[in-house]
Image (cartoon, rainbow, N blue to C red):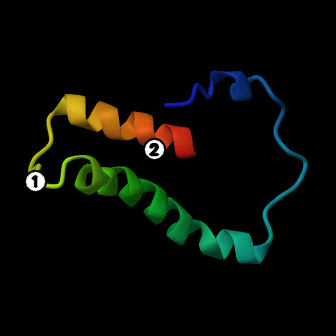
Amino acid sequence: MADLHPLATHPPLDRTPDEETEAAWPDITGGLSVAPAQCFKILHPDLNNPPTRHWDEARAVFGLLV
């Protein structure tokens, strides 16, 4: 997954999200949490109960997209 540590040193943004953006957060976070799991069905369609190595693989693919 992408290294986010460099972002931690940046000062906070001086803008707050508008109401429309805040209202969309549940959909955005829901989509971001479901998408890596959907990678399993693409990468390994017959896989049930994926082991750690498959999670790592799905996170790596998803990390490229985010």
Residue 43 in the image, given as x and y percentages of width and height: 27, 47
Is residue 55 left or right of 9 when viewed as pictured? Answer: left
Is residue 43 left or right of 4 when viewed as pictured? Answer: left
Q: CA distance from mark 1 to mark 2?
A: 19 Å
Mark 1 vs mark 2: in front: 1
Which comes sooner in the sequence, label 1 or label 2?
1
Residue located 10% across and 47% down the image: 49
Packing grade of label 1 (10 A; few <14, some 14-19, many >=20) is: few
Residue located 33% across and 51% down the image: 39
Secondary structure under badge 1? loop
Is residue 38 left or right of 21 when viewed as pictured? Answer: left
Residue 4 in the image, given as x and y percentages of width and height: 62, 28
Q: Quadrant of the C terminus?
A: top right
Q: Residue furthest right?
A: 14
Residue located 24% across and 56% down the image: 41
Residue 40 in the image, given as x and y percentages of width and height: 25, 50
- At label 1, the amino acid type is Asp
Q: Tell me the residue that label 2 is attached to.
A: 62
Is residue 52 left or right of 3 when viewed as pictured? Answer: left
Q: Nearer the viewer, residue 9 or 33?
A: 33
Q: Tell me the residue that label 1 is attached to.
A: 46
Residue located 11% across and 49% down the image: 47
- At label 2, the amino acid type is Phe
Query: Are dots 1 and 2 in contact, CB under 8 Å?
Result: no
Rendered image quadrant of residue 5: top right
Secondary structure under badge 2? helix
